[in-house]
Image (cartoon, rainbow, N blue to C red):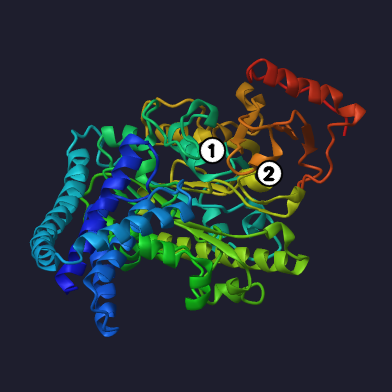
Amino acid sequence: MTLPSAAWFGLLTGFAEVICLGVRKFILHQPIYFGPHIVWMSPLANLCLFTLVGLLFGAMRIVSPGFKAGVMAFLGLLGCALVFEELKFYAVVLFAAGAAWRAGRLIAGREDQFYALARRGARWMAIATLAFCAGAFVWQNCAGMRVSARPTAVRADSPNVLLIVMDTVRAQNLSLYGYARRTTPRLEEFAKTGARFDLAIATAPWTLPSHASIFTGRFPREMSADFRAPLDGAYPTLAETLGASGYLTAGFVANTYYCNAENGLGRGFAHYEDYSVSLSEFALSASLSRAILNRDAARRLINYHDVIGRKTAEDINRSFLQWLDGQDKRPFFAFLNYLDAHEPCLPPAPFDEKFGAKVDPGRFRSVHTLRTSWRRNRERATPQQNQADIDCYDGAIAYLDEQIGRLLDDLRRRGKLKNTLVIITSDHGEAFGENGHYGHIDSAYLTQLRVPLLISMPGLVPAGAVVEEAVSLRDLPATVTDLTGKTSVFPGSSVARYWRRSPAEEAPAEEATPLLSEINIAPSRPREYSSGSKAIITSLVLDRYHYLRNPDGREELYDYLKDPSERRDLSGDAESRPVMSAFKNLLQSHIRFSPLPEKNH
């Protein structure tokens, strides 16, 4: 088999994979986790892979055209089938093997005709690949230009807005909030320039609905965003609202699994960087290379345990600043998502050993998939292993702290900070064995819901302000529109009310409103609940209490002021009955909020 024939098989497989991805996306309505550049990257990646196989055949002196064509057909069919994750692997292998055997028999004895067809086909498919490559770049640039070219009604001196989300960073591991380890010296310094919120609560303990709430001001139950469903266009986003008034809008995300534009979070951004054109993205663009690289055995062999293509905080900062350099004088809204504290937690040196010995991920068995990775059986970790995970997590937070500090220093040198509203927060936290849970997608304790929140803007936010009352991240869109002088189209209330009132004023009535968070955990813990049920955990925070209702009807109650680790469940205590009754009434009346009865402490 000649190299043009191998190239034909590779290009054909690549285009077939693109068609299969299109079926998944547009017909089956499933996420594919690829951007528009996949239309040319997949054919090109498969071209390289199949050419390598062709060279290998030459080196092995395999001369049988039928055998070589059969192997190529097998690999091509296998690659296409791997696009559909629901298909059973062994069934796919058997089908591909049978079809490949038949293809080899058809080609045997017709080599000349096949080679001629392959040469012509490879030539035209190569031209098509180049055309798709150019088209993808043009389409991407034109889409951003269309949004940027909207009529502007915003004043040139309107404040910029910088929203920084540290994915998976819980408040309790920040020295900013009293943690014993000095994980966040730069954030402590920055907090002196604005307001620090001591009890900020995310609306969900995982990425997509929490970010969707930050962008829309809506609760998870109001939105379409779920494990397999994107955020739809039912509600306006912050980027849409600011962009419509003339703001330059841009997003730079490291969490390409749930923060991608495909999941609806890119709506309203003129410029949105999720999937990059890079060597790592190129390697992921072919199903076969993706399947090999995500095998745990292959990762151990090459000693690489990170998510392939994961962007560091330094990468995100660099992209944002490069974008900023090319913009005009209009105010901007920029969203930065950092993923460095998310599993697998692999901070760079020296942060990997800042709080303990460097963790060797190769010691553990892990699951690697497209855009994400996690360690198996974390619940079986010894106390020493769990502490090593916390050490690594703290190191990642310290790395993020340094990178955020560097970014703020750079913006200050450019003269941008004096007119920029900066919001630094997280979408959710992480559990390290507390309440028997690990990670963040199967429970709703404060380890997963309590996040950092800092807001700073010279002249608008008082320096050194500390807000002790519980606040919800769903209030951020209303806060941004308030502080930028826009008419709010978002539900919720601006958290500026906390620093605007005088010390003698009583808390506004809406501060007695419980903060709602929830999660549908059916996809992550299916064995614990009845088949087909929606396993929703509902969380309410009010006064000093945290109430949880589990899918099986079991209720929990914690006094987080006395018991911040939520170790003592008060739901069965006689003196807690009035409080439990009040929370039950809230749920039964469709979350119609009212103050809780007083309890003696």
Q: What kind of residue is marked 1?
A: Leu
* Residue 325 visible, this orientation: no
Q: Are marks 1 and 2 in contact (CB under 8 Å)?
A: no
* Residue 174 visible, this orientation: yes
Q: Label 1 crowding class (10 Å Cα cut-off): few <14, some 14-19, many 20+? A: many
Along the viewing direction, whichever of 37 and 474 lies nearer the viewer: 37
- Provide residue 164's location: percent of width, then percent of height: 45, 50
Reading the image, the residue beneath label 1 is 473
- The quadrant in which residue 446 appears is top right
Query: Above or below — where is 119 with respect to 528?
Result: below
Reading the image, the residue beneath label 2 is 446
- Provide residue 418's location: percent of width, then percent of height: 38, 51
- Provide residue 475's location: percent of width, then percent of height: 51, 33
Query: Above or below — where is 107 with respect to 534?
Result: below
Between marks 1 and 2, how big is the CA–CA gap?
Answer: 14 Å
Q: Secondary structure at mark 2?
A: helix
Q: Is residue 363 left or right of residue 561?
A: left
